[in-house]
Image: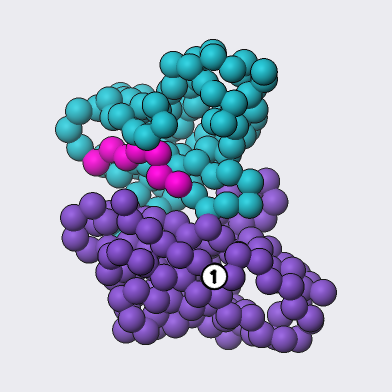
């Protein structure tokens, strides 16, 4: 069955520290891969996406993600976290251009 | 980038009344729109998918007579919660996907609507 797993429910990092949020998916072929961010009471904002090509993709707000086919992973990274990055992050996987599955989300807390 | 507007952002209504939520794609044609429901501290739950000019496809367990979806144009979809009850209180989010260029294969989200039924 198709699934998206975000193993970390909650992560706390210090401001200025690096960040990596994990995402694993289950699918027979290479799906479309996305990371979205949601601030409290808001909708989702697209951070970055991977469809094909270079497996390291750059997004907005200094985020990047790397697609690793062998690990079925699409982890999100940022070298230096800012206090404004505190939010909920969702990994999403698109299948056959018709459906999208979201992970459970990872809540990021940034310590001063 | 592609912009999706959702209105209202917050609505409070009495039990038994109906509430309409609008979702508009402002700068692209949305051939497909999606409606999600999100419970506190949880992920998004897809309620239904609507294609312009067609009836919506509802996910299993979602009452189509309670959650009426209309996608009458390429830029507008509406969700009407009929005879709302307190258990319908939730955060509803729409998204839109285009068919060309940068909007193809990507869902762009509205800001969400917080529905509170008293």
Q: Which residue is mark 1?
A: B7
In this rendering, is residue B84 above or below B110? below
Q: Position of residue B57 (x, y in %)?
A: 43, 75
Q: Can you say whether B82 is above or below B113 in the image?
A: below
> Whole-percent x and y of residue B29?
27, 69
Q: Residues within 10 Å of mark 1 (few under 14, many from 20)?
A: some
Q: Quadrant of the C terminus of chain A?
A: top right
Residue drawn at point x = 82 percent, y = 74 percent: B118
**A4, above or below B35, in the image:** above
Residue drawn at the location 79% of the way across and 81% of the way down: B14
With respect to residue B68, does B5 lie above or below? above
Rendering coords of residue A54 (x, y %)? 20, 28
Q: Quadrant of residue A110?
A: top right
> Which color is chain B depicted in?
purple
* Residue at 66% over, 85% down: B18
Can you see residue B114? yes
Does A13 lie within the magenta span?
A: no
The colour one sees for chain A in the rendered image is: cyan
> Toward the viewer: B45 or A41?
A41
Percent of width and height locating residue A20: 48, 21
Toward the viewer: B114 or B106? B114
Q: Which residues are magenta?
A: A45-51
Q: Quadrant of residue A27?
A: top left
């Amino acid at each position: 069955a198709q699934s998206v797993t975000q193993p970390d429910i909650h992560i706390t990092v210090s401001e200025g520290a690096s960040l990596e949020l994990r995402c694993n998916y289950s699918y027979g072929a290479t799906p479309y891969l996305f990371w979205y961010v949601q601030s409290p009471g808001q909708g989702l904002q697209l951070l970055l996406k991977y469809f094909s090509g270079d497996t390291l993709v750059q997004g907005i707000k200094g985020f990047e993600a790397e697609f690793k086919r062998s690990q079925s992973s699409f982890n999100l990274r940022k070298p230096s976290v800012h206090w404004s990055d505190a939010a909920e992050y969702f990994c999403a996987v698109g299948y056959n251009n018709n459906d999208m599955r979201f992970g459970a989300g990872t809540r990021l807390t940034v310590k001063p | 980038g592609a912009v999706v507007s959702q209105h209202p952002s917050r609505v409070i209504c009495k039990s038994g009344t109906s509430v309409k939520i609008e979702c508009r794609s402002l700068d692209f044609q949305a051939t497909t729109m999606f409606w999600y429901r999100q419970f506190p501290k949880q992920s998004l739950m897809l309620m239904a998918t609507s294609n312009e000019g067609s009836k919506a496809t509802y996910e299993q367990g979602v009452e189509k007579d309670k959650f009426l979806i209309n996608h009458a144009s390429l830029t507008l979809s509406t969700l009407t919660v009929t005879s709302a009850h307190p258990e319908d209180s939730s955060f509803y989010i729409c998204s839109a996907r285009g068919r060309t260029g940068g909007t193809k294969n990507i869902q762009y989200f509205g800001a969400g609507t917080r529905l509170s039924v008293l």
